[in-house]
Amino acid sequence: MILKERTKSINHLLLESLNYRMDLSFNEKILYENQIKGLKGEQLFDDCMNDSQLTGLIINDLLISTRDTHFQIDSLLITADRIYLYEVKNYSGTYHYRDGSLFSGSGHALQDPLAQADRKRAYLYNLLLNFGYQTEITSYVVYINPDFYIYSLPSTRSIIFAGQLPKHFNDLVKQLPNATDRIAALGDKLVKLHDYNFRPANLPEYTFDQLQKGILCPECFSFRHTASRQFRLCSDCGHQEKIAEAIHRSIGEFRLLFPAVDLTKDFIYEWCGRDCSKSRIQVVLKSNYHTHFAGRGTYYS
């Protein structure tokens, strides 16, 4: 049973929006491309896990912030006797293992994913201990891309390659005990810990004025469209959606990019490229947000 579905991370959504509204630097584009690649790998992992018909509870993309640190977990499988933590990597190419690091053919080094997974396992174990759960946690690194290979890798059961994943899940299915109310309560507690407001520190710098305005197509991210009274039609890919839904989606994008800015009709009018009337924008705001009055102005939250 899936308790939390996988969605694009906040980092992914922010970089996605900025990529189409401003000129990202070379390194910033690499960050965005890595988000896309990582999500594709995680979705391949999800497909394999779902095909196995596991009986435990599944939590995807769990981001936990504590007073001392924050950590993100790609996937958790919660069973009656332990938790399985999966760190999914979508690397491609050939690497060599040496002194706890992975080295590409060109000599570039990657941090050891096993050490990353072990740190997350320790963080999660201590966190659960504070809540009264003394639960065994087994961590794995999954290299989901079949075109990935590591030379000189020491023997370890903590690494799973793409071709080994179906057998890994099938073996788990045979040995997993039945679910209990206790793991259901634990799963709910972990989902509630997810930090929906976390914002990464390495974002590109941007201001409202420098970003291109308009409503992006949710499929191909084009600004080009035609409109009827109720619908918008993307001129590039043909995607159609109701104008009210497009405005609502764009408001969400604005709030993601500018969480500290008061949400007003005039700001959204500018943000949508002045393509939609203020009256129509106001209807969407009133229908989906709380109205606040400040002097002569009105804002929403």
Image: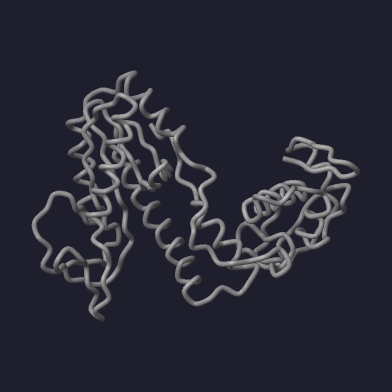
Q: Nearer the viewer, residue 110 or 149?
A: 110
Classify the position of the N terminus by image quarter: top left
- Position of 264 with respect to 150 (left or right) is right
Residue 272 at what x, y percent from top left? 77, 58
Residue projecting furthest to the bottom: 106
Q: Nearer the viewer, residue 280 or 72?
A: 72
Expressed as whole percent of the image width and height from the top left, the position of residue 153 reads 12, 63
Give me the residue at 30% from left, 32% from top.
78
Say above or below: 277 vs 175: below
Q: Is 147 displayed left or right of 199 in the figure? A: left
Q: Would residue 203 be found to the left or right of residue 241 on screen? A: left
Residue 169 vs residue 159, the one in the foreground: 159
Q: Is residue 238 above or below residue 243?
A: below
- Name the image quarter holding residue 124: top left
Quadrant in which the C terminus is drawn: top right
Q: In the picture provided, is 99 more to the left or to the right than 50?
A: left
Q: Is residue 71 above or below residue 106?
A: above
Q: Residue at x 49, y 65 (%)?
A: 32
Question: Residue 44, percent across and down?
Answer: 36, 53
Q: Residue at x 65, y 53 (%)?
A: 253
Tell me the quarter of the picture where residue 271 sits: bottom right
Q: Position of residue 282 (x, y in %)?
A: 84, 44
Q: Is residue 55 visible?
A: no
Q: Residue furthest front?
A: 68
Residue 274 visible here: yes
Q: How many marks?
A: 0
Q: Residue at x 84, y 42 (%)?
A: 298
